[in-house]
Image (spheres, rainbow, N blue to C red):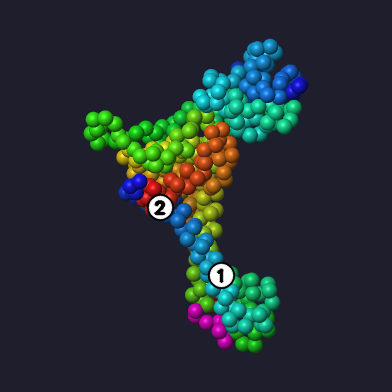
Amino acid sequence: MRSRTVSQPAMSFEYIMWMFTRISGLALLFLGFIGLVMALIMNARNLLDMPTLTRWTFFPNPNHVVNSNIPDVSQGWANAYWQIMEMVIALFGISHGFNGLRVVIEDFIGNTFWQPMIRGVIFLMWLFFIIIAFYVILAS
Amino acid sequence: MKVTVKILRYNPEKDKRPRYRTYHVEAEPTDRVLDVLEKIKGYQDGSLSFRRSCAHGICGSCAMRINGMNRLACKTLIKDLHSDKIVIEPLLGLPLMKDLIVDMKPFFEHYQSVKPYLINDEPPPLTERLQSPEERERFDDTTKCILCAACTTSCPSFWSNGQYVGPAAIVNAHRFIFDSRDRGAAERLRILSDQFGVYRCHTIFNCTLACPRDIQITKAIGEVKRAIATGSLD
Ligand code: FES
């Protein structure tokens, strides 16, 4: 059987967001995995309890570990590397979630005159949460 | 055996909203639900309306909700319902016209929107457009569709928004997109990648469950999504 190909359609907004949902979902798992492995390398088994470790895995913010047995969080637990990690996680997570909300709402409202307005509201909410998250990350 | 049949009745000239009517019918376990409906219409209540034609599961006229599932009345045996109580309702998501009859117009408009016919402007060869058995096999599953609308009207995405083309239209697009003789794949993929194309499918699998022809519908939709993403029609 000869293999058949087709020229791909121009990327539609729906297609891009569909791809983004898959990629960001996988990326979040991967980033969480890195956070977990790095914490264990930094002796999390003796320093953190399970809930703290879970919080750190999905959002490696020093605020999450200050009350645990770590003598000094500035030793490996709080630095620019983790800040970048957190920002990437926040960006992927918040975008993934708000896009999901958009998809659910548009499943119902479809292409009506409400659609641009609702997209606008969701975009503003997305922006608001990104700003808050980045503020928290950079201030901690 | 005696079966109790509850049917959602609606006469647009008299009723404000649909109402259930109950009938008691003598039936064999090997009778089909369609036989029971014929018995009611013939002997108890001639005003009962429903669509049927072939009575052999091939014309796709008699799809309805039987005990909550979309099925063909002519293909469903009483004994397979495992109950002597049968509830029969019209399909969901399409405008109700009368009793068990729904307006299929939106359904066929979606079907037409994906160009469900061979597109090939190349000059035809002297004999026929040849195809290997493997190439034919590639889209065999989706050729089985009888357009009964059981899948589309079982889809929550379609219920919530009738603008979605629905699984049946995608199945019929798949049938031509993956046909080696066809040249219209790019155009169909463009149509299906828009807001009401394949991305309104959230892999709920109701369609696959409802299909009386056992077509792997969700898989076919997945293959169309993959073709859009990769450009490969293998
Ligand atoms: S009557 Fe033709 S499919 Fe049931």
The single residue placed furthest to the front in the displayed view is B133
Q: Mark 2 — residue?
A: B229
Do tag 1 and tag 2 residues touch (Cβ < 8 Å)? no
**In terms of depth relative to the viewer, which is nearer, B99 or A30?**
A30
Q: Which mark is residue A77?
A: none
Q: Kindly tell me whether residue A83 is visible in this rendering.
A: yes
Please tell me in which quadrant of the rendered image residue A33 appears.
bottom right
**Side of B127 where A20 appears, left or right:** right
Q: Chain of mark 2?
A: B
Residue range of the region highlighted in magenta in the rendering: A74-81
Camera-side residue: A124 or B96? B96
Task: Check disc 2 and report its element: helix, strand or loop.
Answer: helix
Task: Estimate the x, y position of residue B21 in percent, counting from the top left.
Answer: 71, 22
* Residue at left offset 52%, top offset 50%: A103
Is A130 magenta? The answer is no
Report the residue at 55% width, 37% height from top: B214
Q: Quadrant of residue B197?
A: top left
Question: Is residue A77 highlighted in magenta?
Answer: yes
- Residue B24 vertical position relative to residue A45 in the rendered view, above or below: above
* Residue that mark 1 sits on: A32
- Kindly indicate whether the residues beneath marks 1 and 2 are on one polypeptide chain: no
Q: Amino acid at mark 2?
A: Ala
What SS does tag 1 mark? helix
Q: Residue at x 56, y 82 (%)?
A: A78
Q: Residue B124: image x %, image y %?
A: 25, 32
